[in-house]
Amino acid sequence: MLDKNGIAKRIAKELKDGYYVNLGIGIPTLVANYIPHGVSVTLQSENGLLGMGPFPFEGEEDPDLINAGKQTITTLPGSSIFDSALSFGMIRAGKVDLTILGAMEVSENGDIANWKIPGKMVKGMGGAMDLVASAKNIIVAMQHVNKAGESKLLPACTLPLTGTNCVKKIVTELGVFDVLPEGGFKLLERAPGVSVEHIKNSTAGKLIIEGEIPEMAI
Amino acid sequence: MNKVVANAVEAVKDIADGSTLMVGGFGLCGIPENSIAALVKKNVKNLTCISNNAGVDDFGLGLLLQQKQIKKMISSYVGENAEFERQLLSGELEVELIPQGTLATRCMAAGYGMPAIFTPAGVGTEVAIGKEVRNFNGKDYLMEYAFDADFAIIKAWKGDKHGNLIYRSTSRNFNPLMAMGGKITIAEVEELVEPGELDPDQIHTPGIYVHRIFQGKDYEKRIEQRTVRAKG
């Protein structure tokens, strides 16, 4: 089974040289720590920055320079800064190659819910709806089951949707799944030490298993 | 041409009860601190605020929320404000949550003289309820109207007496879009300079969009999430 860093590390293997990538808050942010050697990616922060650098050294924080999670960050050689409309313009126009974000639920047809729990959480969608509506490739990083032990990979989402038919791939602590265009979660890899049976028991949506499922190499 | 007003109090003096305001900034980054303080002092009520966030409990728009000056917020993310959540759940505050890109582009559309935009954000979600859907090239888009705001209050780094503005780093965010979108735009700047001191090629907001400008003071620039790495 993977921990949060393990999920991030596995997703990092999906990055390709030259990609522009938007990382959501939570596990997706950790992906930046595992970018493979020889792969150069440019991180987009939707508040208006391409080329997000690491956190500043202590004492060098700049209140005018933050990321979409409102954390102090740095720029890199080659960074650029722009306004929020341009930032979502490049997202809407499909210029961002990959969006990695967290989710509360994903359905077997690729719908995603991650912004609202009616009556409980009213924080808002931020940029998530814009991102999922336009991204060419969306990978979801999340725990396979919720705190109550219920599957988050469902036949249909029960929470208010963020977007429809958009998630392409899911990485959880149990495995890697493609969301097929015709519907269904296709199991590609098992996390170390996790059985296919365990994954079956933890997945409420349609699970597709073809042949031997390899254990992931990370 | 001189758009300079003496201070924030002077700049906001005709903002009346019931006005709709665009308020610049992302989180607490690039917010018009002086104008917000002047609105608190003026105690103007029943405001509708279009702003990406709602500040934190004791800073930014949170200061207006504390005094119950805001009737309605139009935002994309309000997660950092407990008082906001309380007023929302108790029904004291009306809230319209909309996608961040939609928010930005509706401001921009107002400044570009375009009545509406089409965006795929929110198609198939509760954001789409009651909105016109149009299909272009096989994909569905929502029609979203340009905002109609009485005032935009924004913050820039440098500005000249003609109202030309330059922003610094990611404090740019929504500020240039709201500057374009307000019927009356009030800009506060860290450094107010004479015409000619700013390079025309570097101007982010042309002065035509700005009606009042003043030299701000005592900027706190509070950091919401101070994240650092160790030296060495």
Image (spheres, coloured by chain):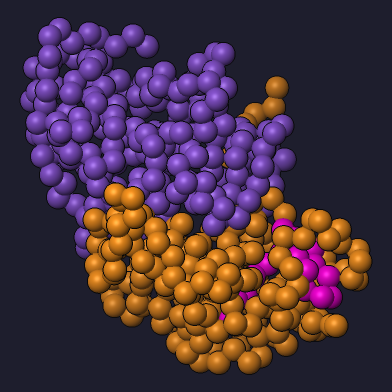
Q: Position of residue B217 (x, y in %)?
A: 77, 70
Residue in the picture at 54% in, 40% down: A44
Q: Quadrant of the N terminus of chain A?
A: top left
Q: Position of residue B74 (x, y in %)?
A: 42, 71
Placement of B202 over or under B1, stated as above or below: above
- Within the image, what quadrant is residue A118 found in? bottom left
Residue in the picture at 52% in, 80% down: B149
Task: From the viewer's side, name the closer residue of A189 and B203.
Answer: B203
Task: From the viewer's side, name the closer residue of B222 and B28.
Answer: B28
Magenta stretch encompasses residue A146:
no
Is residue A158 found left or right of B186 in the rendered image?
A: left
Q: Which chain is purple?
A: A
Task: From the viewer's side, name the closer residue of B38 and B150.
Answer: B150
- Which stretch appears magenta? B151-167
Main secondary structure along the magenta-highlighted residues: strand
Placement of B122 over or under A72, stated as above or below: below
Residue in the picture at 79% in, 82% down: B3
- Within the image, what quadrant is residue B122 found in? bottom left
Chain B tint as drawn: orange
Task: From the viewer's side, name the closer residue of A22 and A124.
Answer: A22
Q: Position of residue B97 (x, y in %)?
A: 36, 65
Residue in the picture at 73% in, 87% down: B10
Q: Quadrant of the C terminus of chain A?
A: top left
Tally of numbered discs? 0
Is residue B73 found left or right of B180 in the rendered image?
A: left
**Residue A176 visible in the current orientation:** yes
**Residue B61 visible in the current orientation:** no
